[in-house]
Image (cartoon, grey):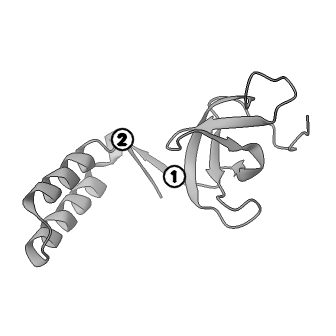
Amino acid sequence: MKDSGLHLKAGDIVDYHSVIGEEITSRGHTVKSIQHMNSDPESRIVAWITDKVGCVALEALSRSTSDRIVHSSDIDPYLKHLHMAVLEMTAYTDLSGELSALLLAAIQKVGKVYL
């Protein structure tokens, strides 16, 4: 088993690189767990992180450089901005009312914003 050199544990905040060694693709993920890819103890060690489906290679992660993660108590200004953007997009495009409602419902479920 190869050591990635990055010692992570559940709860650590990491940034994700879709291309290993390149620019950050997304920031501020929380490590949910780190374990073998499958039941074979010789299999690769991988991480499960928030906002990603499935596991990711440890080499695709770096310690987070996010200056700030805005949690629900501070999120209102950002959500209001998104809400207004959807309303404007609906008014000035052919976005259907059904899709607009879906976007507005999704915005209400946002729990944190990464800056």
Mark 1 nearby-residue class (10 Å; few <14, some 14–19, many ≥20)? few
Up the image or down, 18 lies above or below 74; here it is below
Mark 2 nearby-residue class (10 Å; few <14, some 14–19, many ≥20)? few
Up the image or down, 56 lies above or below 40; here it is below
Looking at this view, name the residue that lies furthest to the right.
2
Up the image or down, 70 lies above or below 36; here it is below
Looking at the figure, which quarter contains the N terminus? top right
**Residue drawn at 25 percent across, 60 percent down:** 82
**Residue drawn at 21 percent across, 67 percent down:** 85
**Residue drawn at 64 percent across, 46 percent down:** 14
Q: Would you say 93 lies left or right of 7 here? A: left
**Residue 43 in picture, x, y percent from top left:** 82, 31
Q: For residue 100, what is the image quadrant? A: bottom left
**Residue 34 in picture, x, y percent from top left:** 71, 30
Of residues 80 and 61, the one drawn nearer to the viewer in this rendering:
61
| Circles 1 and 2: CB atoms closer than 8 Å | no
What residue did someone put label 1 on? 68
Q: Nearer the viewer, mark 1 or mark 2?
A: 2
Q: For residue 83, what is the image quadrant? A: bottom left
Tag shown at residue 9: none
Amino acid of disc 1: Arg
**Residue 63 in picture, x, y percent from top left:** 70, 48
**Residue drawn at 87 percent across, 44 percent down:** 5
Q: Secondary structure at mark 1?
A: loop
What residue did someone put label 2 on? 111
Of residues 98 and 65, the one drawn nearer to the viewer in this rendering:
98
Q: Would you say 28 lies left or right of 23 here? A: left
Mark closest to the chain's N terminus, 1 or 2: 1
**Residue 79 in picture, x, y percent from top left:** 26, 54
Amino acid of disc 2: Gly
Q: Secondary structure at mark 2?
A: loop
Q: CA distance from mark 1 to mark 2?
A: 14 Å
